[in-house]
Image (cartoon, rainbow, N blue to C red):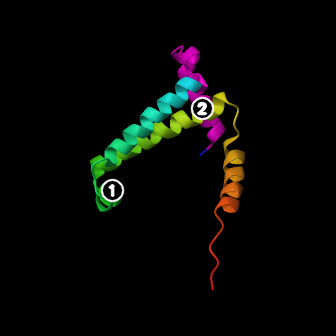
Amino acid sequence: MDIQALQEKLRDFAAARCWQPFHTPKNLSTALLVEAAELAEVFQWMTAEESQLAHLEPVMKERIADEVADVLLYLLQVADQCAIDIPAAVANKLVKNAIKHPEPARG
Protein backbone atom coordinates (compact mmCIF):
# COMPACT_ATOMS: atom_id res chain seq x y z
CA MET A 1 0.00 0.00 0.00
CA ASP A 2 1.37 3.38 -1.03
CA ILE A 3 0.27 5.58 1.87
CA GLN A 4 1.20 8.88 0.25
CA ALA A 5 -0.63 7.99 -2.97
CA LEU A 6 -3.71 7.02 -0.98
CA GLN A 7 -3.59 10.28 0.98
CA GLU A 8 -3.34 12.19 -2.29
CA LYS A 9 -6.32 10.28 -3.66
CA LEU A 10 -8.30 11.16 -0.51
CA ARG A 11 -7.30 14.84 -0.85
CA ASP A 12 -8.44 14.82 -4.49
CA PHE A 13 -11.71 13.10 -3.55
CA ALA A 14 -12.42 15.74 -0.90
CA ALA A 15 -11.41 18.61 -3.19
CA ALA A 16 -13.72 17.40 -5.95
CA ARG A 17 -16.59 17.66 -3.47
CA CYS A 18 -15.42 20.95 -1.88
CA TRP A 19 -15.03 19.25 1.49
CA GLN A 20 -11.64 20.78 2.39
CA PRO A 21 -13.09 23.37 4.82
CA PHE A 22 -14.61 20.52 6.81
CA HIS A 23 -11.55 18.26 6.78
CA THR A 24 -9.90 19.68 9.87
CA PRO A 25 -8.02 17.48 12.34
CA LYS A 26 -10.88 17.99 14.82
CA ASN A 27 -13.61 16.95 12.40
CA LEU A 28 -11.64 14.07 10.90
CA SER A 29 -10.68 12.68 14.31
CA THR A 30 -14.33 12.88 15.38
CA ALA A 31 -15.36 11.03 12.22
CA LEU A 32 -12.64 8.48 12.97
CA LEU A 33 -14.17 7.87 16.41
CA VAL A 34 -17.61 7.38 14.87
CA GLU A 35 -16.26 4.86 12.39
CA ALA A 36 -14.33 3.03 15.12
CA ALA A 37 -17.58 2.84 17.08
CA GLU A 38 -19.31 1.38 14.03
CA LEU A 39 -16.60 -1.27 13.84
CA ALA A 40 -17.09 -2.04 17.54
CA GLU A 41 -20.84 -2.24 16.93
CA VAL A 42 -20.29 -5.14 14.53
CA PHE A 43 -18.95 -7.22 17.43
CA GLN A 44 -20.88 -5.60 20.28
CA TRP A 45 -23.13 -8.48 21.32
CA MET A 46 -20.92 -11.35 20.20
CA THR A 47 -19.03 -13.57 22.57
CA ALA A 48 -15.25 -13.54 22.24
CA GLU A 49 -15.48 -16.82 20.35
CA GLU A 50 -18.19 -15.54 17.99
CA SER A 51 -16.11 -12.46 17.21
CA GLN A 52 -13.15 -14.64 16.26
CA LEU A 53 -15.30 -16.54 13.75
CA ALA A 54 -17.38 -13.65 12.41
CA HIS A 55 -15.16 -13.06 9.38
CA LEU A 56 -15.85 -16.58 8.13
CA GLU A 57 -19.36 -15.53 7.08
CA PRO A 58 -19.05 -13.57 3.79
CA VAL A 59 -21.64 -10.88 4.56
CA MET A 60 -20.15 -10.26 7.99
CA LYS A 61 -16.63 -10.20 6.57
CA GLU A 62 -17.68 -7.52 4.08
CA ARG A 63 -19.28 -5.48 6.88
CA ILE A 64 -16.10 -5.73 8.96
CA ALA A 65 -13.95 -4.83 5.95
CA ASP A 66 -16.06 -1.77 5.19
CA GLU A 67 -15.71 -0.47 8.75
CA VAL A 68 -11.98 -1.23 8.88
CA ALA A 69 -11.57 0.69 5.62
CA ASP A 70 -13.55 3.66 6.97
CA VAL A 71 -11.35 3.77 10.09
CA LEU A 72 -8.17 3.58 8.03
CA LEU A 73 -9.29 6.23 5.55
CA TYR A 74 -10.11 8.73 8.29
CA LEU A 75 -6.87 7.93 10.11
CA LEU A 76 -4.90 8.57 6.92
CA GLN A 77 -6.65 11.91 6.51
CA VAL A 78 -5.92 12.95 10.12
CA ALA A 79 -2.25 12.09 9.61
CA ASP A 80 -2.21 13.97 6.32
CA GLN A 81 -3.77 17.10 7.84
CA CYS A 82 -1.25 17.00 10.71
CA ALA A 83 1.78 16.28 8.47
CA ILE A 84 2.47 12.98 10.23
CA ASP A 85 4.84 10.61 8.44
CA ILE A 86 2.98 7.39 9.18
CA PRO A 87 5.84 4.89 8.65
CA ALA A 88 8.14 7.00 10.84
CA ALA A 89 5.47 7.45 13.51
CA VAL A 90 4.76 3.71 13.58
CA ALA A 91 8.46 2.83 13.77
CA ASN A 92 8.96 5.33 16.60
CA LYS A 93 5.91 4.03 18.49
CA LEU A 94 7.05 0.41 18.18
CA VAL A 95 10.36 1.38 19.81
CA LYS A 96 8.50 3.18 22.60
CA ASN A 97 6.18 0.18 23.10
CA ALA A 98 9.15 -2.20 23.32
CA ILE A 99 10.66 -0.04 26.06
CA LYS A 100 7.37 0.36 27.90
CA HIS A 101 6.43 -3.31 27.59
CA PRO A 102 9.64 -5.41 27.56
CA GLU A 103 9.49 -9.11 26.91
CA PRO A 104 9.23 -11.14 30.09
CA ALA A 105 12.37 -12.85 31.28
CA ARG A 106 12.44 -16.50 30.28
CA GLY A 107 14.08 -18.90 32.56
Q: In the image, is 78 to the left or to the right of 58?
A: right
At horizontal 54% and vertical 13% (from top left) the residue drawn is 18
Secondary structure beneath dot 2 equals: helix
Q: CA distance from mark 2 to mark 1?
A: 28 Å
Q: Is residue 7 magenta?
A: yes
At horizontal 58% and vertical 30% (from top left) the residue drawn is 9
At horizontal 43% and vertical 33% (from top left) the residue drawn is 34
Disc 2 to disc 1: CB gap under 8 Å? no
How far across and how far down the image is residue 47, in percent?
Answer: 29, 57
Q: Quadrant of the C terminus?
A: bottom right
Disc number at residue 51? 1
Please say if 71 is above or below 31.
below
Q: Amino acid at mark 1?
A: Ser
How far across and how far down the image is residue 26, in percent?
Answer: 57, 25
The dominant secondary structure in magenta is helix
- Magenta residues span 2-25
The residue under label 2 is: 78
Q: In the image, is 83 to the left or to the right of 12?
A: right
Q: Is residue 103 magenta?
A: no
For residue 66, say whether it is visible: no
Q: Amino acid at mark 2?
A: Val
For residue 28, say whether it is visible: yes
- Crowding at mark 1 (Cα within 10 Å: few <14, some 14-19, many 20+): some
Disc number at residue 67? none
Q: Earlier in the sequence, mark 2 or mark 1?
A: 1
Please say if 86 is above or below 55.
above
Secondary structure beneath dot 1 equals: helix
How far across and how far down the image is residue 95, in percent?
Answer: 71, 57
Q: In the image, is 88 to the left or to the right of 9?
A: right
At horizontal 52% and vertical 40% (from top left) the residue drawn is 72
Please say if 66 is above or below 24.
below
